[in-house]
Image (tube, rainbow, N blue to C red):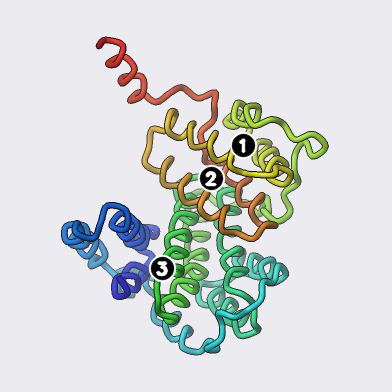
């Protein structure tokens, strides 16, 4: 896997699916057992062999070589950095306008200034969430799921150079996602995830109300989720309710993929970041007022006929 982490993170072709494939292959084998590795890894290698070179693939592979070199310049004790919310906010601002190589260099500079990598990952995930606020859809969704997979590679790898590469690639790829979203009908300037105001701050609405109204006004729902997540003693009830709706209302693999990624990242994010990252999920999660999935209805009819 140490070899495959790098190949999975090599290029952004197909909006990040290679590293998503790599990460979930590893997760699957950790669950079902490595005696099943051969067919899984054959499929994975076949997938990541496609592309990976600058030129024919344009800029999708361009950050790789520079970020690999950048990783070698970071101080050896980079993992001993301290959390810094100000650095998170600063890097989030960089992602809004920087080029891919510039974004990675800013992250490397923060590490050299003894900022914890966790603060930089907070910025990465917030930026992906903000893209969903600005232009909900397939590109922004994958900005979150690919960042989650790069984060998983960062956590799973035992080599500093690979871990740093995953972080720098995540920073560079956010700029590619931003421009890809812009190419799909434009990208509004706002809202900004770090300036999002909670709705119903004085009396956060109950969870059933939030999910019942979720699909009627996503912007309002995001502010309500922010209010709930900022005050709730535990987010477990939110995760349970959202997961139930994904399973009963979901009709697409992205419903499952996104929910799994965002819930994992909310749990690992800094406490001040969790509510805002979860608020962005209101633009993608399923709502209680949606109809149950056709497959679920078909299953119910089949069971009733027994």
Residue 24, given in percent of the width and then of the height, sits at 34, 56
- Separation of residues labelled 3 and 2 (CA atoms): 30 Å
Label 3: which secondary element? helix
The residue that disc 3 covers is 156
188 with respect to 149 (left or right): right
Q: Is residue 160 above or below residue 146?
A: below
- Of circles 3 and 2, which is in front? 3
At 65% across and 84% down in the image, what residue appears?
113
The residue that disc 1 covers is 218
Locate the N terminus and report the quarter of the image it occupies.
bottom left
Circle 2 Cα neighbour tier, 10 Å, few/some/many (<14 / 14–19 / ≥20): some
- Separation of residues labelled 1 and 2 (CA atoms): 10 Å
Residue 298, given in percent of the width and then of the height, sits at 31, 19
Picture quadrant where residue 87 is located: bottom right
Residue 150, given in percent of the width and then of the height, sits at 44, 65
Label 1: which secondary element? helix
Q: Are marks 1 and 2 in contact (CB under 8 Å)?
A: yes
- Separation of residues labelled 1 and 3 (CA atoms): 34 Å
Q: Is residue 278 above or below residue 65?
A: above
Q: Is residue 69 above or below residue 119?
A: below
Label 2: which secondary element? loop
Residue 89, given in percent of the width and then of the height, sits at 69, 66
Dot label at residue 136: 2
Circle 3 Cα neighbour tier, 10 Å, few/some/many (<14 / 14–19 / ≥20): some
At 64% across and 65% down in the image, what residue appears?
92
At 28% across and 57% down in the image, what residue appears?
29
Question: Which one is in front, 30 or 7?
Answer: 30
Circle 1 Cα neighbour tier, 10 Å, few/some/many (<14 / 14–19 / ≥20): many
């Amino acid at each position: 896997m140490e070899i495959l982490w790098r190949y999975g993170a090599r290029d952004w072709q197909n909006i990040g699916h290679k590293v998503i494939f790599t990460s979930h292959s590893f997760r699957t084998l950790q669950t079902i057992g490595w005696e099943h590795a051969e067919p899984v890894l054959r499929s994975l290698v076949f997938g990541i062999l496609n592309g990976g070179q600058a030129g024919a693939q344009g800029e999708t592979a361009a950050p790789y070589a520079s970020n690999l070199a950048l990783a070698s310049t970071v101080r050896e004790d980079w993992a001993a950095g301290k959390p810094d919310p100000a650095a998170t906010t600063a890097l989030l601002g960089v992602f809004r306008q920087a080029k891919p190589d510039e974004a990675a260099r800013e992250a490397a500079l923060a590490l050299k200034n003894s900022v914890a990598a966790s603060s930089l990952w907070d910025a990465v995930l917030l930026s992906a969430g903000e893209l969903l606020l600005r232009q909900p859809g397939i590109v922004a969704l994958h900005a979150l799921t690919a960042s989650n997979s790069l984060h998983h590679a960062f956590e799973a790898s035992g080599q500093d150079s690979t871990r740093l590469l995953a972080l720098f690639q995540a920073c560079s790829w956010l700029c590619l996602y931003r421009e890809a979203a812009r190419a799909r009908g434009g990208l509004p300037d706002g809202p900004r995830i770090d300036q999002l105001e909670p709705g119903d701050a004085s009396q956060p609405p109950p969870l059933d109300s939030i999910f019942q109204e979720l699909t009627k006004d996503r912007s309002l729902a995001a502010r309500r989720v922010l209010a709930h997540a900022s005050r709730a003693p535990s987010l477990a009830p939110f995760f349970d309710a959202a997961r139930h709706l994904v399973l009963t209302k979901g009709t697409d693999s992205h419903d499952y993929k996104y929910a799994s990624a965002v819930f994992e990242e909310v749990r690992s994010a800094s406490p001040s970041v969790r509510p805002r990252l979860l608020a962005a999920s209101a633009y993608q999660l399923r709502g209680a007022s949606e109809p149950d999935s056709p497959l679920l209805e078909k299953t119910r009819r089949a069971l009733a006929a027994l």
